[in-house]
Image (tube, rainbow, N blue to C red):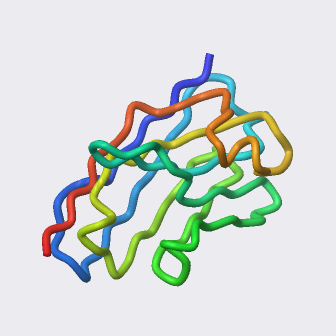
Amino acid sequence: QVQLVESGGGSVQAGGSLRLSCAPSGYNFRLLCMGWFRQAPGKEREAVAAIDRDRRRTYADFVKGRFTISRDNADNTLYLQMNSLKSEDTAMYYCAADYRSTCGVGFLRGAVSYWGQGTQVTVSS
């Protein structure tokens, strides 16, 4: 069984930066597609960014140019560098992982094998 543990959330002022991390435990060497989702109060969960083992990246339009997703293939640790944060980025951020070789539409719609417990990001204006 794989568990995903996020860290790095917190409170920051608009324009600031945070770096989220996601460390998988258990047998995780077949986790090929990994990504970040977020959910704000009263809103649906949405995909933020995804990356496969070849480091091909997909970003939601609302974070392009501000967020960078990366991964360490040695242990499948996943990162999300968030710069120029806005108040509308306030949400619970979730790490997700799956055995698919590419992070396609299914993954981005939330059809994933594993979810983390979430880490809160709060941006004040």
Q: How many marks?
A: 0
The image position of residue 78, as x and y in percent, is 56, 52
Where 27 falls versus 108 (above or below)? above
Q: In this image, 82 relative to 10: left or right?
A: right
Identify the residue at image location x=75%, y=63%. 55
Residue 11: quadrant of the picture: bottom left
Residue 99: quadrant of the picture: top right
Identify the residue at image location x=77%, y=65%. 56
The image position of residue 26, as x and y in percent, is 60, 23
Q: In this image, 63 relative to 30: left or right?
A: left
Where 85 falls versus 74 (above or below)? below
Identify the residue at image location x=29%, y=74%. 86
The image position of residue 16, as x and y in percent, is 25, 78
Quarter that holds the C terminus: bottom left
Q: In this image, 59 relative to 46: left or right?
A: right
Residue 2: quadrant of the picture: top right
Q: Residue furthest top?
A: 1
Identify the residue at image location x=62%, y=67%. 59
Q: Nearer the viewer, residue 36 or 46?
A: 46
Quarter that holds the N terminus: top right
Q: Residue furthest front?
A: 42
